[in-house]
Image (tube, rainbow, N blue to C red):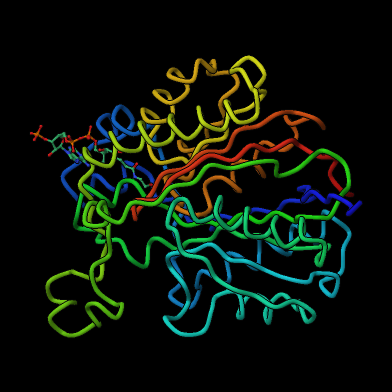
Amino acid sequence: MRTRYNAAITALGGYVPENVLTNHDLEKMVDTNDEWIVARTGIKERRIVNDAHIATSDLAVKAVERLLSDAKLSPEAIECVIVATSTPDYIMVSTASVVCEKAGLVNAWGVDSNAACSGFLYALTLGASLIEGGRYKNVIVIGADKNSAIINYEDRNTCILFGDGAGAVLLEQTTEHTGVIDNVFRTDGSGKEQLIVKAGGSMNPSSIETVTNKLNYITQNGRVVFKAAIEGMTQTCNEVFERNDLKSSDVNWLVPHQANLRIIQAVGEKLDISTDHVKVNIDRYGNTTAATIPLCLWDYKNDFKEGDKMILTAFGAGFSWGATYLIWSKLRG
Ligand code: UT7
């Protein structure tokens, strides 16, 4: 009988820029205030790159270097790198190519996957599939976004929400029942206008007009996205519960995409998972798009024990959303 392989997360790395942008800093830039931002989003501060020469790949490389150092692995051991990002270094040339070069991953091929805030979960399943198929033993999956590159710091609807950061996980082949177990994902392009960067791609190439009209920045219809996020995450989590015969009391940790504390709390309540089992770091980093979930896993890795049952869930532009069932594995190092 063919051996069944699973993809275990055995090492992690995270990175956020040192430069802090607080709510009080934003008060000086747009018509907003700390009380409103904390009450409506849970965000107190976020990290923003303050050097024009630092790109998404640089954030990702820092996360990969921390991962490799913790794992006591040499860069040559890595076979494949998947970078989830919607702020690639370039339109053409994958950020994964740049990451492989800068981090010395000389034996790896790399590819980007863009599904905005759901990007990391989708990339995790793609990476896990390579390993489950038996041909790969070591795959790094990264979620990285330099959101400050696509934020209009004159738009209070969006500039208060987003931060920059990167998180990376190492997936390793195992025959044990651990690691990435299952997922339920959805996409619905009819939601695309609700959260979008309209220009810069083939639909609307960048021009003087797109820049003048601020079409190269994120725009969002917050209320519509808010409602759809709660519904979508709750529904896919419930489907994952059913498919895997899980009850909410079986779940040790819910690790949700960090877009808004009120969304996180609503999803936790609907799933009947108490707040002490829900991981939150939005107060410190804001919404780092594809990086929120791996950053959260990295931040709280000391709280997780081998065998812990975890549900990761995200919702983002596209619309794209879903939930992943993960069993926490023994970490290297
Ligand atoms: O990661 C991808 C997925 N993204 C999300 O999940 C984000 C989903 N949406 C949200 O998190 C929320 O909708 C926001 C945080 C973006 C906005 O919160 P809200 O509670 O939905 O506020 P709202 O847009 O309904 O605005 C309420 C009021 C408005 O004033 P009026 O019309 O009631 O007078 C806004 O103009 O708050 C005003 N407002 C602000 N006030 C101070 C909007 N932005 C701000 C601001 N500071 N930054």
Q: Position of residue 121 (x, y in %)?
A: 56, 50
Q: How many discs mark residues in the rendered view? A: 0
Residue 141 found in image quarter: bottom right
Q: Position of residue 242 (x, y in %)?
A: 57, 26
Residue 140 found in image quarter: bottom right
Residue 286 horizontal side relative to residue 171, left or right: left
Depth check, front residue: 51 or 278: 278
> Residue 244, relative to residue 94: is it above or below?
above
Residue shown at 54% from the left, 70% from the top? 112
Q: Position of residue 65 (x, y in %)?
A: 73, 64
Residue shown at 27% from the left, 60% from the top? 196
Residue most extreme to the front:
1
Residue shown at 67% from the left, 44% from the top? 298
Depth check, front residue: 25 or 234: 234
> Residue 146, relative to residue 109: is it above or below?
above
> Residue 82, relative to residue 41: is it above or below?
below
Residue 269 horizontal side relative to residue 4, left or right: left
Residue shown at 63% from the left, 54% from the top? 124
For ligand 1, the image quadrant comes to: top left
> Residue 116, relative to residue 261: is it above or below?
below
Q: Position of residue 108 (x, y in %)?
A: 75, 76
Residue 253 horizontal side relative to residue 264, left or right: right
